[in-house]
Amino acid sequence: MTTPHHIPRRFGRLTAVGAALTALVIAATGTAVQAAASPKTPEKPPVPSLAWTDCQGGFECANADVPLDYRKPHGRTITLAVVRKKAADQTKRKGTLFMQPGGPGNSGVDFVRNNHADLPAALRDSFDVFGYDIRGVGRSSPLTCFDDARYTRAVTEAKGVPGPGAFEPALREAAEFDQACVDNAGELLPYVGTEYVARDIDLLREALGEQQLTYYGRSFGSYIGTVYAAMFPKRVRALTLDGAYDPVHYANRPYAYDRSQYLALDGAMSRFLDWCAADQATCGFGEGTPRAAFEKLKADLDAAPVPTANGGQANGYTLVYRLMFNINEGKVIWPALGAALHKAQLRDNTSFLLRPPSPASFDFLGPNVAVECVDRDYPRDLRRLKHNVTANAKAAPLLGPAMAYGPPTYDHQHATACVQWPGERVSRYDGSYRAKGSAPILVLGTTGDPDTPYGDAVALSRQLDKASLLTFRAEGHTAFGRSACATDAVVGYLVDLVVPASGTTCADETQPPSSTPATAPPGTTLSELRNGVNERVERIGTVS
């Protein structure tokens, strides 16, 4: 048996130099380094052995060794951190429920630990609830590109209202980011794509003794689930894809995918500002002209950043960055957003919208960029890149310019890095997404989703061989845990395999409260966000 060789956080000089030379070839020729064909593995990789240990709160933790490169199933390994909490009554247990958060970059271990207590009792009683950190993320050989100091400089120098000539500096900074990825994680980068993640899940399924997969994935977790179903359709028991991606656009037509994300995010911000104008007493921002006030606030913060309690600075980019994530909570957070914008006008650094990205954020953002650059096939054409970046900034004027010309952080800011990506992408999935022969799959889409546009869920439901689409008519990101109607449908599907009729619509979003509540309403993380302690922690919440 081959002795496993585990992947360290940082790697030697030789690999970095080789990848850097590859980057120079790309820059000189404009020719993409093509991803290798999907690996065909004549030999089955060894199934991981899970040695469970108590890790407090009734949870058990273990490590799973899986192949670094599935083309060499008995070669080097990478260690994945996994967690589970068993069903209280094992005699009534139906199996294991895999739970996958969004991202890429969020910890699946933390996702399960943070949300287990708030899951509906029917799920906790029916399943051992299982999560893991995907390769390159969290406790599973986390990859690093920019270090904390370099990332801090990048987000501090970014602008909420970038001026003329912003594209070229953004392109240079993205190239620096790519080179940092090569220098700090070069040996891992080719292997963090979603095809290998899906193969990891199948090995973990087998390690847990499950014949088929029961799965809930939200946001990017929905894409992971989609790829799993495409590769292993007969091994699907029940697959819930919440806040779903259009996989064809995401992987193969990335500019089309980016465009819809820009428009969805700006659309959500626009609807919030319309509400502010209509309900000035509750919103408390803008004095009757919230759009003009917002544009002025971005420019004012750029011109004179607000000192933060830890010695940093908050500017217009900080404001846009925090809005991009916090608006995901839907209408229930709108009064808190109004209050936080008003505090920002007063240069009050206790506003949660004036918290610059921190090292905890960077642990999420670096893998977020790297994984998507491996997954997505951007044309290697700088003129086309500039055209699309410029067009997106113009089409989404509220938040788009800061995203388009900012440093590589979240989804909207990946194109400049991914077009210049220097390495191989052997773990990218590029097959059909039909999942022919799978069990029925449940797809959920939220009509006002600012992060994964509703049209993506519609497209995915049509691409899959057997899918049922549930629509949540609401603002905000994802449906499970935010809608009692959608939550009940998900529970009935996962537990009893009762598939909602395609076309089912839920319309029970919590409306904006008449004032900023003191505590989080059911199903939200408002208190965390308002108090400024949330660093992209994904919580499902409870629904009354």
Image: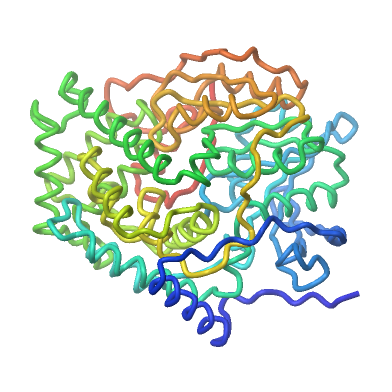
Q: Quadrant of the C terminus?
A: top right
Q: Is residue 72 left or right of residue 195?
A: right
Residue 317 locus on image (x, y percent): 23, 53
Q: In the displayed structure, would residue 27 be above or below residue 161?
A: below
Residue 350 locus on image (x, y percent): 25, 50
Q: Is residue 6 left or right of residue 16?
A: right
Of residues 58 and 297, the one drawn nearer to the viewer in this rendering: 297
Total labels: the figure holds: 0
Of residues 63 and 151, the one drawn nearer to the viewer in this rendering: 151
Q: In the displayed structure, would residue 129 be above or below residue 510?
A: below
Q: Residue furthest bottom?
A: 13
> Which residue occupies 41% across, 66% down?
30
Quarter of the image for residue 428 reads: bottom right
Residue 324 locus on image (x, y percent): 33, 43
Quarter of the image for residue 543 reads: top right
> Which residue occupies 59% across, 61% down?
35
Q: Is residue 538 left or right of residue 256?
A: right
> Which residue occupies 41% across, 43% down?
528
Q: In the displayed structure, would residue 423 be above or below residue 99?
A: below
Q: Quadrant of the N terminus?
A: bottom right
> Which residue occupies 35% across, 74% down?
149
Residue 319 locus on image (x, y percent): 24, 48
Asked which colour scheme the image uses, the reply is rainbow
Q: Is residue 528 left or right of residue 471?
A: left
